[in-house]
Image (spheres, grey):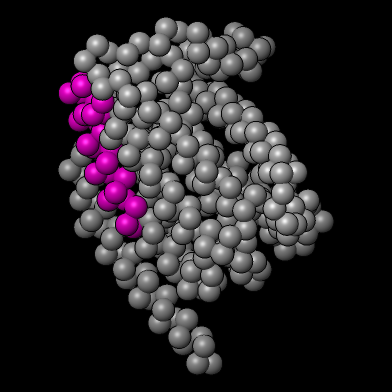
Amino acid sequence: MMADLLNSSPSLVNFGIFFLLATLFLFVVLGYVTYVILAERKVMGFMQLRIGPNQLGGKWGLLQTAADVLKLLLKEDIIPKLADKPLYILAPVIAFAPSFMVVAVIPFTDNFYFADIGVGLLYYIAISGITVLGMVTAGWASNNKYALLGAMRGAAQMISYEIPLVMSVVGVILLSGSLNLTDIVNAQQNGWFMILQPIGFILFFISAVAELNRIPFDLPESESELVSGYHVDYSGFRFAFFMLTEYTYMFAMSALIVVLFLGGWLPLPFLGFIPGAVWFALKFSVVTFVLLWLRSTFPRVRPDQLMEFAWKILLPIALANIFLTAIIKEIINLF
């Protein structure tokens, strides 16, 4: 259906259909965010020998996050007296908008996608980089030293880890010969890039965790040092926007990992009778679980360790991986 819409000529009807589909998909993402937060709390509870939320919504606390979100939305919206009011109000929007925009290029199956552009991977990387502007704007506009420190940490971290993140997928681009995400999935018919590019996969996953500001790389928010960092002065629905941004990026990044390294909707051998959408959902769920798992497993690293790890370890390995992949591909082409 989506492919047929893309091939049709632009019109107000098409605009209305795409707007409706985008709105519906926004609710899907909101549902994901709601229940991945619940899943995170339950996973952490089990790993720490606790029960986790179990009061609202039965034994599993299925309505706990919804109640928390409602409470958050009903809270008073406070703007600090000395804050830069226009930028303070604009910052959550700058942070959230790119997180939802990047989802447009993720192909969930061979027929279900929103924008099948030739440089989908480049689009994702370019648009996601805008979020750091929202983070810096929030930290500076709050006129709070803890918020500013968190914003500076966040900017340094996200810019630094974008470099190994981008370089880790160069091997994937070399093997697939395309920046189009659908073509990258189709290039994995004979083997997932997680197997063909194990170094690139590990580099990408580590860099993705840092880009998501997740433990052990949650330096911009580190509660024990910066009392939540760049959004410490935000409350109510504006704070909810920052939380929504974080988990929407988790959705987008998990989907991107599935597309780039886990074969997207492609099935395992001899299991092709299972629909591609089911395969995508299963792989996506595994990646999301691993991201939740890490939070209960690793301690937070120091800021100096964080930066040294990106520049002194990940970057040289990424360069070596590109060089090695190019050599291997050239040898294969010769024979």
Please name whichever residue, 175 or 61, is drawn nearer the observer in this view of the structure: 175
Q: Name the foreground residue: 153 vs 23.
A: 23
Q: At 34% from the left edge and 64% from the top edge, which residue is drawn? A: 318
Per the picture, the main secondary structure of the magenta-coloured stretch is helix
- Residue ID at (55%, 29%): 33
Please indicate, yes or no, whether residue 272 appears anywhere in the rendered image: yes
Residues shaded magenta: 139-164
Taking depth in this image into account, of 55 and 7 the one nearest to the observer is: 7
Q: Which quarter of the picture shows residue 301?
A: top left
Residue 298 visible in the picture: no
- The location of residue 40, given as percent across then percent down, is 51, 28
Q: Where 281 falls versus 237 (above or below)?
A: below
Asked if the magenta segment contains residue 16, the reply would be: no
Please check the rendered image and state whether residue 153 is part of the magenta-colored stretch, yes or no: yes
Q: Up-down: is 327 above or below 261?
A: below
Question: Residue visible at 32% across and 57% down?
Answer: 163
The residue furthest bottom is 335
Q: Nearer the viewer, residue 196 or 67?
A: 67
* Residue 229 location (% of width, % of height): 27, 26
Where does residue 78 sit, x and y in percent of width and height?
A: 35, 10
The residue that appears at 40% across and 82% down in the rendered structure is 327
